[in-house]
Image: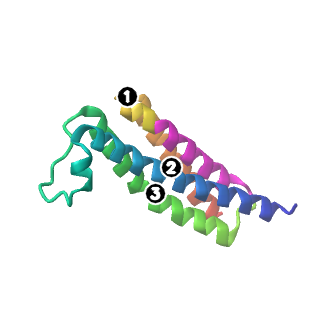
Amino acid sequence: MEPASVNATHVVVLLCLSVFLLLFHILLQGFLATRELGSTWNASPRDDNKQPAGFVPGRAARASKNYQETYPAFIGLLLGLAFIGDASGWGVLGGWLWLVARIVYVPLYLAGIPYIRSLAWVLSIVGLIIMMFALLT
């Protein structure tokens, strides 16, 4: 197998897993909000802008928003790696670091664990920076 095709496989796997994580975020926050506010609220147009009052549903919503803030950068960098290639393999490594850190971030945020949660976020940003440098070199 050629090195480019190995990297392409990693890029596709990273892309699919990142979409899975996005869907997980959406479903988790929806499930937790519905558990608190009820299925009638979920089926409604939500014109009253009612939000869950519990800590965990709020944390799930904020964790999802946080994921969505860095997700476009991840997708852009991943597309760059797919188009230009990643001969060094550092870009794919950065992508895996981003993804693993984002996965670890979810339970840390839901549990309200400070500092370690912030460390997971910082590691995800380091992953994006590694991806960016791999594209530039």
With 87 as the anchor, is 122 left or right in this view? left
Disc 1 from disc 2: Cα separation: 18 Å
With 95 as the anchor, is 118 left or right in this view? left
Residue labelled with disc 1: 111
Residue type of the residue flagged with mark 3:
Tyr
Estimate how packed mark 2 is, as few (under 14), some (14 to 19) or many (20 or more) residues with alpha carbons within 10 Å: some
Give the number of the mark in front: 1 or 3: 1
Q: Quadrant of residue 49?
A: bottom left
Q: Main secondary structure of the magenta part?
A: helix
Residue 71 numbered mark, or none: 3
Residue type of the residue flagged with mark 2:
Leu
Mark 1–mark 2 CB contact (< 8 Å): no
In magenta segment, residue 95: yes
Mark 1–mark 3 CB contact (< 8 Å): no
Please state which of residues 59 and 78 is positioned toward the viewer in this rendering: 59
Please state which of residues 75 and 137 is positioned toward the viewer in this rendering: 75
Q: Earlier in the sequence, mark 1 or mark 2?
A: 2
Quadrant in which the C terminus appears:
bottom right
